[in-house]
Each structure stands twice: as C-alpha cells, then as structure tokens.
Amino acid sequence: MTRTSCRARGVPAPRGVTRLRWRPPVIALLCLALVASACTADRDDPPPSGGVDRPALEAVAATLPADPVEAAERLVTEIHAADPTRSAAATAELLRRAGHPIVSVRGPVVAMPDQVALHDAPVYAELLPLLAAATRAGDRYTVDQFAELLDAVGLTRKKMTFAEVTTAVAGWARDPDHHPIFVTAAAGVRALSGHRQQVLFAGADPDTAYLDPLQTVLLLGHATSRLVEVVDDAQPRAAARPGAFDRLVGGGVAYASDGPCKALTRRFGAPQDPVAKGIVDSAKGYLKDNLVKNLSDEAQNRVGKADEVWGKSAAAASAILLLLGARLSLSADKTSTHFKHTAGSRAEHVLLTATATFDLETALEKIDCYALAGVTVPRSGPLKDFTVRFSTVQPQVGTIQEGGTQLLKAVSADSVKSQRGAKTGADGVATLELKPPVEDPSGEGEKLTGQATYIASLDKESLPFELGDVYGLLSNPVGFGVGKNFDLLRDVLVKAGLPAQQITIEVTYHGSDIVLAQGAGEVNLILAKLPKVYVDLVSCAGLAGPFTGTAGYSGAQSGQLLQMAGAATGVHVPKGFAGKANRISVTPNNQGGPEPFFIMKGEGGNQFLDGVLRFYPFLNTRAEILADYRVGRPVGDVEILLAGSSFPFSRLSWPVVRVTTDPRCPEVRYFHDET
C-alpha cells in the first residue's frame, strides 16, 4: 500500500499532541494493532535536512505490485539500477515496508511503516544514499561478522555458527500467514543475495557468501527490535519515563517528549492496550524465533532477553550505518596477470591500491535526534593514519604442482603489510604489491587459469578509537548519551568492523592441474564373473578436461551354473573370455550436473558398460591415499554403470582426486623469486 501525506488524503495535520516516552518491558514485546493507514506528515516539525524525502518514496511505491515478495524483489532491482537517486529511494521504501521508520537527524519523521513498526530500528533518511551506494558498491560483512554482532549486542551468549545463521535466514518468513513486514524483509534479504547469484544456506561457502550493508541493517533490526503499533499522530497517549539504560544509550534522546525529536514517539502506539498486545504476541515470522530454534537447548536458554539488547542494538545499527561514511575503495593496476617466465621480472606484478575517505553525499554536520544524538559528522576527505588489512582467498591453494600453492603473494618489501596491515597516508591511500611465481620450464603444458581474490578492510581493532576522535563523540550536549553509548558499542564495533571491499585478479599459468578419475572392481553376474572392470582417466587441465584414458574389463569367467548347463546339453562353454578396453575422452559441459560417458556395448549391441563423472560444488580438504601412495584431494566421484544402472552388489564408484604429479602430464615447477 502506498503511503500518502495527510494533506493528500484530506486529513488535517495535527497541531497538539500529548507526549510519550517508552518504558522498556522486561518480559513481553510492545503491543501491536493493525490500522488501515496513517498520516506521514508532521506539519509543525522542521523539514528534513536532506537525503531521501517522502515524494521520492511515493514515486517508487506507486510502481510496485501488491504481493510483498514481488514488491521486495522489484525494489532490489531498483536499488541496483543505474539511477543512484532512485536507488536510495528504493532502499528507503524496502526498509519502510520491512518495518523501519525513516527519520531525519533533526527529528521529523520522513515515512512510517503502514501498520506496525520496529520500535528500536529507525533509520536516518540522510544516510540512506550512503547505504544504497555501499550496497551497490559490493561492501560486505561476512556471516561470521554478523554472528559476532548478535553476540556483541547481547542477543546470544555464544556466537552462532555459519550454518546456524544461514539456516535461520533461509527459512525465515516463508509461510503465507507470516506478517507482511517479516515477509518483505526476508524476501528482500534473499533477493539481495540472488542479485549477486548467491544463496544463503548451510551448505554455502563461508569464504564467498556474505551480507551487504542493507541486508545487515534488515537482519539486525528484525533480530533485535520490538514491534509496536503505528498510530495516527492525532491520538493522545500518556507519557512514560524512560528507564536508566534507555537514558544511558540515548533512548531518552531518541524518544524525547519535547522539541522536534518527539516526532517519532507520537507515532508509536501505547503498550498497555490488551488487544494490541494480543496481536503482537500472535504475529508469526519473527527472525529471532528462527535464530533461536536452530540453537541447542542450552544455547536457547542463554539468548538475551534483557532490555539492554534493544537499546544497544538500535544504537549499533545506527552507528554502523553512519560509519559507512568511512569509505574504502580497492583497485588494481591490472585485473589479470601471468606466472613469470623470467625470475626478477616485475612486469607481471599487480599493485593493489586501497583508498580510505569519509564521503557523505548529504550535507550533514551534526545529528540532533535519536540514537546518535550529539555526534558531530566530519567533513568529506581522506582518512589519514588508518590501518588497512589485506587478506586473500585463493581456492586453488594446494591444487597445482610443486611451489604453486599461491597464485599471488606480497613482494618481499610488502610482506609486513600483508601480515600487519598498511597505514594510509595523508591522501588516505595504502598499497600492496603482489607477485606471481616463476614457471620452470616456462610455457610448458596446458594454459590454465585461476583466480586470486584480495579483500581490504579498515582495521577493526583500532576502529572505535580512531573514529571516536573523527566523529567528535564527546560533543553530546545531553551529557550522557553518545559518549557512553560508544563506550558500550566498542565491543560491537571491534567485532563487526566496517564492511570490506574485494577485487579478483585472474592469473594464467602453464603447467598441469592434474585430476584423476580411476578405480577398479569386481562384478559377479552369477552365470559369469568379471574379475575386473575399471576406469582410468586423467585431466591435465583441471576439472574443465578433457579427461582421457581407458575403461573396460580385463576378462570374464563363466560361472559354475553356466558350466553345468553346457555339460548337460553337450555344449562346450569356455571357462574364460577375453577382456576388452576402449579409449575414452570426456569433456565436461560446465553445467554442474553429472557427466555421463560411453564405455562399450555388449553382445548384439546391447547396452553394457557406461560411466558417469560427478563433481563437488565445494572445496573438499579431505586427503585420499591412492594405491601408489600418492595423496589426492577429492573433487568428485566416478562410477561405472551396468546396463545403464548402478550395480548394487559391488562397489563400482571411486573418488575423483586432484594430485600434483602423473606421468601422463607435463611436470612444471613453480617458485617465488626474491623481488
């Protein structure tokens, strides 16, 4: 449903309002009641200070379908479209439909959710262009970082595993009877992953699966916030005095009863209404419920229920959003290179450049209201003396020949940077020079391609202290809010850090990426016996193939029943039959499914022996000891089929393994020079 302003709907804007502050409940969530619609304008409040405005949201909302899943998916498409202004508006509309109030740093409410809201998760409109830009730029939090975040804010007392978090997210709010704000948020999270061709599930690769900043804000809000009814601003309500923790972390500022910061408070329904409370308690699709049910019974009992979770998580989400202003870009002077042919050459080197700046598109000097009230925002420009950490993901480690366990590594002069990080200069820049190994002999064997991914992030250990100075955190005029707020958030910021940037370098080299598909077994057919059926294939070019070699059987022996039948009928039945082998060549089609291949037909042209190759979609680190004592890493399996089917009475399936040597493939040695 598209939201409209009070004037657009013909409803007079309210002038007089009573005041409300919330008192944190200890046991239950705040009450929730459904209303058909609510005004979003506050005529007496000062105008928002920039960022996304209400007309921009309404323009985006006017084009959306009614179904919440389809609407969320459409919004994700808009977020990643070419127009950055519309992208920011789509980001705001997705958050609004997912239950987040959109507020201004100076107090006014820009847009409210339609029926119910996440009480503890308002989002600053001025920071939404930054959130959209960071999401579009590929900023990322690992799932492990998000688990650290949940632990740091007190939701869990023990960090959840990758599988626990992704299982909870994968199954979140999929039922038709789940509340629309949960369905919208969950569909948005999944669509954002889908846009980059990822799926968050327990079997995903922890090294490559990640959360973008928008997903992080959505998940954190829904994991830790309370639900509250959204009401017409004209409804009078009684005030409640905020508790000690509420005042400590800025809740007293966030939901003040006087001045422009009152705007959000008067849009929240009263928690005392028993009808509303019943609706809140019966709402289905809470992310927290999904997170908890994937924990052990002991861990479930330790899930945080204290009021501190709400206040701390709300401030954490706002702080993380604001810290997106500290931008980190990562570039390379080349995106592809080759192993060296001559030691000492530097032409193949790659120079990574990380640039740290503060960049906030909206003109913003100070935050007056809500969880970060009192924060002074720095001017745009380079961030000097920040430590940039570099890490790498190279799935090819240990898969190519001797000396080639790293496609790229830091040059000798930069080895300390790769271990301890690099400080940015006055221009906000830190660099890391990389080198590939040397081929020996050069140009020998197949031309192969690998990928080395490098990740840059601002050092999270010193982050809260450095940014504490940058943001002027002690300037809070209320005396207790943001300074102590950031003291409480220090653990959160140290554990979560800032989202990282990554770049992938394509590295080509000559040599052999050796994969073996071989095995042998016995087949007993009662009337006859095949003592050995076998397959022996090798690829010198990795999983792409071709796999070449032989497959067949070494001979056949007639069984006792067949011998007896021949004797009874006077027919001579030989005790043995000659074997047969065929040359095989299999080139996988790169579709990720089974790769069937033909071995040979039987008597009369009937189907006899066939094979199938299957490859794992993930990296397997288990070792497989071969018959000749070579050590291989399993990458799949190969199976021999009889008459098109698996043979149930013998083991005719064997691991496909990656090895470092095979006499059928060229042998190339790799080493890193002293540059």
Image: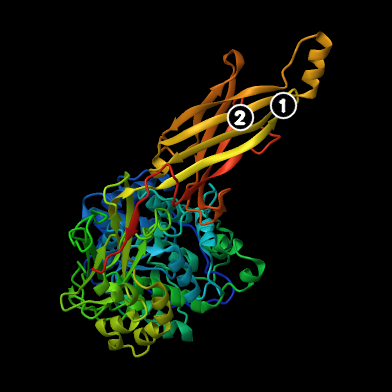
For residue 232, say whether it is visible.
no
* Closer to the camera in the image, 193 or 566: 566
* Closer to the camera in the image, 308 or 632: 632
> Given the image, on which type of amino acid does mark 2 rest?
Ser
What residue is shown at x 67% (from left), y 25% (from top)? 556
Gap in angstroms between the C-alphas marked 1 and 2 = 15 Å
Label 2 neighbourhood size at 10 Å, few (<14), some (14-19), many (20+)? some
Label 1 neighbourhood size at 10 Å, few (<14), some (14-19), many (20+)? few
* Closer to the camera in the image, 244 or 659: 659
Q: Secondary structure at mark 1?
A: loop
- Left or right, residue 501 beside residue 646: left
What residue is shown at x 37% (from left), y 49% (from top)? 667
Q: Secondary structure at mark 2?
A: strand
**Disc sitting over residue 2 in the figure:** none
* 498 relative to 636, above or below: below
Q: Are marks 1 and 2 in contact (CB under 8 Å)?
A: no
Q: Position of residue 223 (x, y in %)?
A: 49, 65
Q: Earlier in the sequence, mark 1 or mark 2?
A: 1
Q: Position of residue 510 (x, y in %)?
A: 30, 48
**Disc sitting over residue 525 in the figure:** 1
* Closer to the camera in the image, 237 or 394: 394
Residue that sits furthest to the top in the current view: 570
Q: Position of residue 495 (x, y in %)?
A: 42, 75
Q: Which residue is mark 2?
A: 554
